[in-house]
Image (cartoon, rainbow, N blue to C red):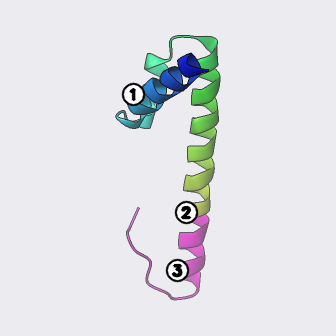
Amino acid sequence: MLFLKKNRDHFLKLYSSLCSHQWTEVATNQHQEAIVRSLLAARDAFLEIRRHMREMGIAAGVPVRPPL
């Protein structure tokens, strides 16, 4: 279990220091690749939600910050 915690902590530290477009470049095995795919899917979903929230704000005449 200690190995998994150390591995997870290393993975999180490494990926948190990179831009999302670099994540696939440093994945070294299929488990990391699967995690990267999940993280990128979550990122894409977040950006899509943010875009729709911005559109709603603009349609309602509410100033939206920060700009994209």
User: Which element is circle 2 on?
Assistant: helix
Q: Are marks 3 and 1 in contact (CB under 8 Å)?
A: no
Using the image, tell me which numbered label, if any, was put on residue 58.
3
Q: Which residues are magenta?
A: 50-68
Callout in the foreground (1, 2)? 1
Horizontal side of 20 relative to 32 (left or right) equals left
Horizontal side of 48 relative to 22 (left or right) equals right
x and y percent of residue 68 in the render?
41, 61
* Residue 61 among magenta residues: yes
Write the residue at 60% across / 77% down.
56
* Residue 17 among magenta residues: no
Q: Cα distance, mark 3 to mark 2? A: 12 Å
Write the residue at 47% across / 25% down.
11
Q: Nearer the N terminus, badge 3 or badge 2? A: 2
Using the image, tell me which numbered label, if any, was put on residue 50.
2
Q: Nearer the N terminus, badge 3 or badge 1? A: 1
Write the residue at 43% across / 24% down.
10
Q: Amino acid at mark 2?
A: Arg
Write the residue at 58% across / 54% down.
46
Q: Amino acid at mark 1?
A: Leu
Q: Are marks 3 and 2 in contact (CB under 8 Å)?
A: no
Q: Amino acid at mark 3?
A: Ile
Label 1 sits on residue = 14
Quarter residue 32 falls in:
top right
